[in-house]
Amino acid sequence: MKNELNLTRRQFLKTSSAVAATAAAAPVILTGAPNNARLKIGLVGCGGRGSGAANQALNADPNVVLTALADVFPEPMQHCLGALQKKYGDKVQVPEGNCFTGLDGYQKLIDSGVDVVLLATPPGFRPQHLKAAIEAGKHVFCEKPMATDAVGVRSVMASAELAREKGLSLVAGFCWRYNPKCRAFYKRIHDGAIGEVRAVYATYLTGPVKPMPPANTRPAGMGDVEWQLRNWYNFVWLSGDGLVEQACHSVDKIAWAMKDNPPLRAVANGGRHVPNNEGNIFDHIDVFYEYPNGVRAFIAQRQIPNCYSDNSDYLIGSEGTGNNGWGAPTIKGKETWRYQPQGPERDMYQVEHDELFASIRKGTPVNDGKWMAQSTLMAIMGRMSAYTGQAVTWEQALKSNEQLVPEKLTWDMKLPIAPMAVPGKTKLI
């Protein structure tokens, strides 16, 4: 990790290009799992997204079985297990001894003999869990975002490189990258359908998610760690803020449009409009990303009730425009184009897992490590700028020593809630 602390933007690009070239030239070192070999799946994080990931994994391959679950709390795990058993029957074989709770449950699951690990806890834990899974030689589905601070991103980068060296598949939960219509759209954009991309405006304007309950509703005797984990979305160290946890999808599509070349710097505005009790995340942030040659990208993120909603990407090129959202993407440029599905629509969440398990069977590893880490860092640098009121360069974000996640988290420790950031007063670290 010491070398990564000194990475500049140019070095990051050079190193990433070299890694990609090496991966393309090197022989595949993963031995494909034949179709008659049963693959054992373990799920870490049994909430809604984790339950969805387990559903998709069990649908992705006819010869897989879920053998282990892990969650900090027993309630979501039992709910998840019951629903999966009802739906999949014998494909769910999780004995009582393979239901792991507590902060160390993820490690017990990894050690239980699974082949594929699905990571779907609050993202503050992602770097630690990914590191453990890759070091243990497991294939991984890694839900977005990959970290909540730059220290975590650097850990993810190292884990992704280790996965490449070991020939392990690492698939990111940035689901739009696996959406057939988006793939068709961005391929045309990259092929020059609107000329050179000059600007991207992305929106993530939606309602609030998991509002923070009043402090006086905290049960007597509940410790700081449990209280924050049960309301994880409202704390920066666990969620990264709405920009990082939710709108990171829109940030990722900006990165995709820019062919995954990182921005030079970001300038952002944001704040908290709706009171949030003890929580410390903003509910709106606008980020302005600067690229070489005067190219700009903008994202508007707002999670406030009773407001205008939009979740789209608007691209402006030298020879046309492109629009991408929940409907069919369109392009008006050298040609007028509207996406037309070739056959039944494929669910992007399912495609992620279909391609993960196909790669394992074929022995041709997928590794989303570089771009998934970069997209996460782009979101984090936007939050850093909004919270401090400062312009943040790519180098500053990449080398930041701000560590939000406690290095040694224990169930009974005191964990004071950090105050809400104040632009102009909160320091850039």
Image (spheres, helix red, strand yellow):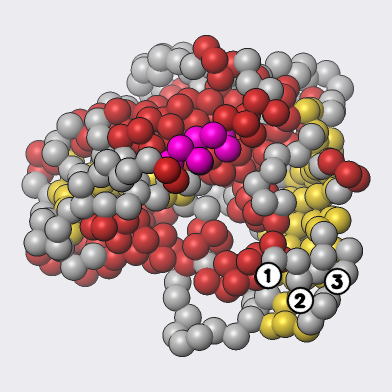
Residue denoted by label 1: 188
Q: CA distance from mark 3 to mark 1?
A: 12 Å
The image shows residue 305 at horizontal and vertical percentages of 71, 58
Residue denoted by label 2: 331
Considering only order in the chain, which callout, 2 or 1, is on the residue closer to the N terminus?
1
Residue farthest to the front? 25
Q: Note whether 145 is above or below 224 in the view shown.
A: below
The image shows residue 302 at horizontal and vertical percentages of 74, 51
Residue denoted by label 3: 320
Relative depth, front residue between 359 and 286:
359
Say which amino acid is labelled 2.
Answer: Ile
What's drawn in magenta, residue-wise? 16-23
Q: Secondary structure at mark 2?
A: strand
The image shows residue 365 at horizontal and vertical percentages of 34, 49
Say which amino acid is labelled 3.
Answer: Gly
Say which amino acid is labelled 1.
Answer: Arg
Marks 1 and 2 in Cβ contact (< 8 Å): yes
Does residue 108 appear to the left or right of 140 in the view shown? left
Marks 3 and 2 in Cβ contact (< 8 Å): yes
Relative depth, front residue between 423 and 143:
143
Q: Secondary structure at mark 1?
A: helix
Specify few, some or many for label 2: CA neighbours under 10 Å numbering under 14, 14-19, or 20 or more: many
Q: Going 44% across and 85% down the picture, which residue do you hit?
A: 344
Considering only order in the chain, which callout, 1 or 3, is on the residue closer to the N terminus?
1
What is the quadrant of residue 310 in the picture?
Answer: bottom right
Residue 20 in magenta stretch: yes
Specify few, some or many for label 3: CA neighbours under 10 Å numbering under 14, 14-19, or 20 or more: some
